């Protein structure tokens, strides 16, 4: 294969990796701070309560104990 055929896909992959790091790095750092660097599914104190869906009563939100927010 010639360099002319390999270079565009390599540039596309590099651009995707760089943009992915740029876009998701703040989110991942925030997640790291809220979970203290680890993820333990049994400890769910870092998640916020789920708010109710707007303009609907199909699925009310729940707090972290599983109790409906809207009664």
Image (tube, rainbow, N blue to C red):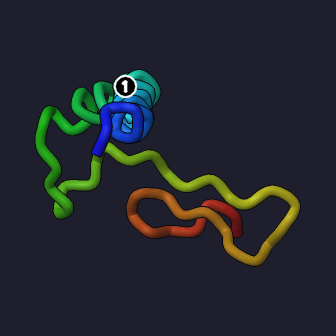
* Image spot of residue 49 (x, y percent): 49, 51
Q: Nearer the viewer, residue 16 or 69?
A: 16
Look at the numbered disc 1 and give the secondary structure of its residue. helix
For the image, the number of numbered tags is 1
Q: Is residue 33 left or right of residue 21?
A: left
* Res 11 → quadrant: top left
* Image spot of residue 9 (x, y percent): 40, 40
- Please determine whether, in this image, residue 6 is positioned above or below residue 15: below
Q: Is residue 40 left or right of residue 2?
A: left
Please name the residue that numbered disc 1 is placed on. Answer: 18
Q: Nearer the viewer, residue 51 or 35?
A: 35
Residue at the location (44% across, 34% down)?
8
The image quadrant where one finds the C terminus is bottom right
Residue at the location (29% across, 26% down)?
29
Q: Nearer the viewer, residue 67 or 16?
A: 16
* Image spot of residue 68 (x, y percent): 58, 68
């Amino acid at each position: 294969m010639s360099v002319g055929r390999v270079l565009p896909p390599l540039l596309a992959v590099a651009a995707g990796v760089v943009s992915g790091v740029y876009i998701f790095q703040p989110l991942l750092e925030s997640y790291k701070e809220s979970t203290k660097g680890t993820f333990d599914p049994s400890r769910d104190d870092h998640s916020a309560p789920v708010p109710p869906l707007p303009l609907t009563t199909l699925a009310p939100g729940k707090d972290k104990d599983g109790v409906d927010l809207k009664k």
